[in-house]
Image (cartoon, rainbow, N blue to C red):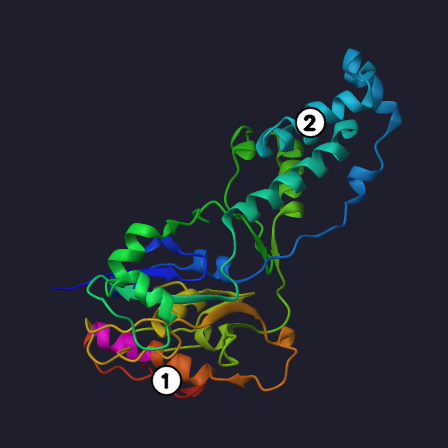
Amino acid sequence: MRRKWNLFNTDKREKAWTASGVYESLIFAPHEWLVKLLARPNFSDTVPAYYLDPYKSDKDELGALARLPEELLIYIVSLTSLDDAACLASTHRLLALEGFFHVRKLQRRKCAHWGSWAGDRIVTVGDSASVLPPGILSPEEEAETEGHFFNFAWDRYERRPTTDGMALNCAGDEAGVPHAALKRLSRHERGDHIRIRLLLKSTRPRYTSTGSWALCNVDRKQYVRANVLADMKMRGYWPHAGWAEGPFVRRTSRVIDLGGLALIMTAGSEDIGATGSVPPWAGDRLTVTTVGDLSEPGWEDVSSTGRSMAEDCIIADDGMMWKPWQSVEDSDSGF
């Protein structure tokens, strides 16, 4: 009988909301949510010029509302939700600045609510696992689980907030997840639609498109680059390479991204034979960042190992000995 699996953060004592299921379906599902948990986003502190220079002559257009004290207008804006504030900010230039500040604050608060697993100990475990491999848990933690880790963690660990609604800016990504504020508008209302879209985009968490992003093992000082996974091609299975957008790997078909690789490298699965039976990174502290931000010396690029593990997982899952293409020239050979 196939086991069910889940991802656990042993430092924060949390379990993943999204990562649960049979091993192969778990591995090949989208895992941007995990990348978002492991990668620390940035927020722009720049205020677009549009919000800094309201036209004073527009004040008369507000009518009686313009006679309200500025402090009261600020207070009214502060009571609104993110989507309401976005709509209010796009209503009039005189409301735009406070609306922008409030939307930015709520975007950051929302991101903080999702939390971060960057630098935490991560392990992917099947429901039949009673005792984890040595070194993953401290003696105190092992005693606490009483030899039944999965059951203990499943019952006692908290579910982390889902990141499914986490819109982001990354390498030209403008869409993110549609907000209710945009749904309230017809696309024929082009001016308001554009203003709200630009406001939401300028206040979202950002992931730089420059540099090489990687899944990093803080304990072992090893990393696997996202672009290596994106370039992976397999004869008869993945005839075309994908592409990397910041820390995210895109592909038109099934994809193994940095989140999926984190599951593979922290789990041992008997469901697919020997692949992953000795999880090299189980219980280690993981993060996703750019290689350029790894300032300490001694880091090792193990991208080829990570790619090989991903390929082995695909081969074992499908049961066919497909081999990766060795060069770009092979893509023109008809395979």
**Residue 314 painted magenta:** yes
Specify the amino acid type for callout 2. Val
Cα separation, mark 1 vs mark 2, equals: 56 Å
**Residue 142, percent across and down?**
32, 67
Indicate the quadrant containing the C terminus: top left, top right, bottom left or bottom right.
bottom left
Residue drawn at the location 71% of the way across and 37% of the way down? 100
Specify the amino acid type for callout 1. Trp
Quadrant of residue 327 within the rendered picture: bottom left
Counting other residues with Cα less than 10 Å from the Cα at mark 2, is it few (<14), some (14-19), or many (20 or more)?
many
Magenta stretch, overall SS: helix
Count the labels in the image: 2
**Residue 161, percent across and down?**
44, 46
**Residue 76 painted magenta:** no
- Give the residue at mark 2: 77
In the image, which residues are magenta?
311-318
The reply to whether discs 1 and 2 touch (Cβ–Cβ < 8 Å) is: no
Residue drawn at the location 29% of the way across and 51% of the way down? 155
Residue 227 visible at all: yes
Q: Left of 141 or right of it: where is 315?
A: left
Residue 235 visible at all: no
Q: Residue furthest right?
A: 56
Q: Left of 11 or right of it: where is 2?
A: left
Quadrant of residue 262 within the rendered picture: bottom left
Q: Left of 56 or right of it: where is 245?
A: left
- Give the residue at mark 1: 325
Residue drawn at the location 33% of the way across and 51% of the way down? 156
Q: Left of 210 or right of it: where is 167?
A: left
Residue drawn at the location 39% of the way across and 88% of the way down? 326
Quadrant of residue 93 within the rendered picture: top right
**Residue 36, percent across and down?**
50, 57
